[in-house]
Image (cartoon, helix red, strand yellow):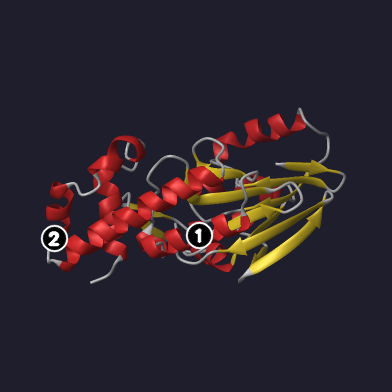
Amino acid sequence: VLIGEDGVILIDDQYAPLTDKIVAAIAKLTDRPIRFLFNTHWHGDHTGGNENLGKAGVIIVAHDNVRERMSKENFMAAFNVTTPPSPREALPIVSFSDSVTFHVNGEELVVTHLKNGHTDGDSIIHFRKTNVIHTGDLVFNGAYPLIDVSSGGSIDGIIAAEEYILSIADDQTRIIPGHGALADQAAVQALHQVLVTARERVRKLKEEGKSLEQIQQAKPNADFDQSYGAGFINGDRIIEFIYQSLGP
């Protein structure tokens, strides 16, 4: 949340039943209205409140692919779930292809699309003056990330996205991940190294002709699984995502 004389800027809005709590929490901080909402990607835990806020007149901003995916039925293979098209009020009314900069509340917010990482519509928001980066789900702090291959995500893309984040961060940057505690440059660097290593291990076994199940049974990333696999994406799931996104 960014609060100032230009109004409230909100990044992602969780699920619809939480809208009232979010609005109430903001009201404790300011009487200014929510003016802009940025969606970092299309998943429901980041866009679920869009309809409520859209009906209230909030301007919703996201990458072109977010609007496209929300406009139609989507099958999310990672959870074997089909989501229906979102109502008109939930759709972003401002979309962009590469990047867009907002000059609000004395801050420069640079919203940048990073391709085919967590999904095909991921954006990060860089608060240039205050040295803060909101990464969306391109960063799970201290945990393996969900890579939604069915929505255009890939292991190569998420690694490249983290490299970009690291390139614009310094050791004073506060990094807000999509999941997990507030992070810093070192935490993102550690996650990046884990994913690079895991990718190469899975790639090697796949090139040797091993099946997904055989690679999972081999547990090539056992040294990372206890810490990074303790969340809702465990060691077998990250192998599955890597295997799928490496292609045939």
Amino acid type, residue under disc 1 in the picture: Glu
Q: Quarter of the image holding residue 209?
A: bottom left
Disc 1 marks which residue?
A: 163
Total numbered circles: 2
Question: Is the residue marked by circle 2 packed among few (<14), some (14-19), or many (20+) residues within 10 Å?
Answer: few
230 to the left or right of 218: right
Tell me the distance, in whole angstroms, between the alpha carbons under discs 1 and 2. Answer: 29 Å
Amino acid type, residue under disc 2 in the picture: Ser
Give coordinates of residue 70: x percent, y percent. 52, 60
100 to the left or right of 71: right
| Residue at the extreme top | 28
* Quarter of the figure that contains the C terminus: bottom left
Q: Residue at x 76, y 27 (%)?
A: 28
Give coordinates of residue 174: x percent, y percent. 63, 42
Q: Residue at x 32, y 54 (%)?
A: 197
The numbered mark, 1 or 2, whose residue comes first in the sequence reads 1
Q: Quarter of the image holding residue 156?
A: bottom left
Q: Is residue 199 visible?
A: yes
| Residue at the extreme front | 171
Give coordinates of residue 77: x percent, y percent. 32, 56
Give coordinates of residue 75: x percent, y percent. 36, 59
Pick the front one: 188 or 48: 188
Where disc 2 sits, the SS reads loop
Disc 2 marks which residue?
A: 211
Q: Residue at x 53, y 66 (%)?
A: 65
